[in-house]
Image (tube, grey):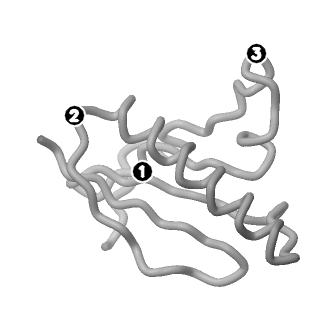
Amino acid sequence: MPKFRFEFIEGMSQPAIFADMADRDEAIKEAKRAAKEAMLDGIIDGADPTSWVTKVYDEAGYLVVTLGFQDLVAAPEDSQRLKEADEPGVMRSG
């Protein structure tokens, strides 16, 4: 299984999380689920998650997806804002 790196930027960077996922689609679904959970926890704690961002990189270090607050609160048909591979071919250090 490919390994993906999940980065959660919630006001300040959090430690990256590494997870084995079947493919890119599964990694994106997991990133959405985890980001929504963190966002809800933040709201409960009184934080403003509107600037929070989640990024997912593949095991080679390439950006798979960037999820922002609007991507997580938009209706499913309106959530075409996913910035999949915004920077194709750009290697990211891990």
Real-space Cα separation, disc 2 to disc 3, in angstroms: 25 Å
Q: Neighbour class for label 3 at 10 Å: few (<14), some, many (≥20)? A: few
User: Percent x, y for residue 7?
Assistant: 47, 66
Q: Is residue 58 above or below residue 79?
A: below
Q: Is residue 15 above or below residue 52?
A: below
Q: Can you identify the residue that label 3 sits on?
A: 77
- The C terminus, quarter of image: bottom left
Task: Give the label on residue 22, or none.
Answer: 2
SS label for mark 2: loop
Q: Are marks 2 and 3 in contact (CB under 8 Å)?
A: no
Q: Neighbour class for label 2 at 10 Å: few (<14), some, many (≥20)? A: few
Q: Residue furthest top?
A: 77
- What residue do we see at 42% from left, 50% from top? 63
Real-space Cα separation, disc 2 to disc 1, in angstroms: 17 Å
Which is more toward the observer, 81 or 47? Answer: 47
- What residue do we see at 34% from left, 60% from top? 5
SS label for mark 1: strand
Lower position in the chain sequence, tag 1 or tag 3: 1
The quadrant where residue 30 appears = top left
User: Percent x, y for residue 77?
Assistant: 76, 15
SS label for mark 3: helix
Judge left or right: residue 14 versus residue 18: right
- What residue do we see at 26% from left, 32% from top? 23
Q: Mark 1 or 3, which is nearer the eye?
A: 3
Q: Amino acid at mark 1?
A: Leu
User: Percent x, y for residue 47?
Assistant: 84, 75
Q: Can you identify the residue that label 1 sits on?
A: 63
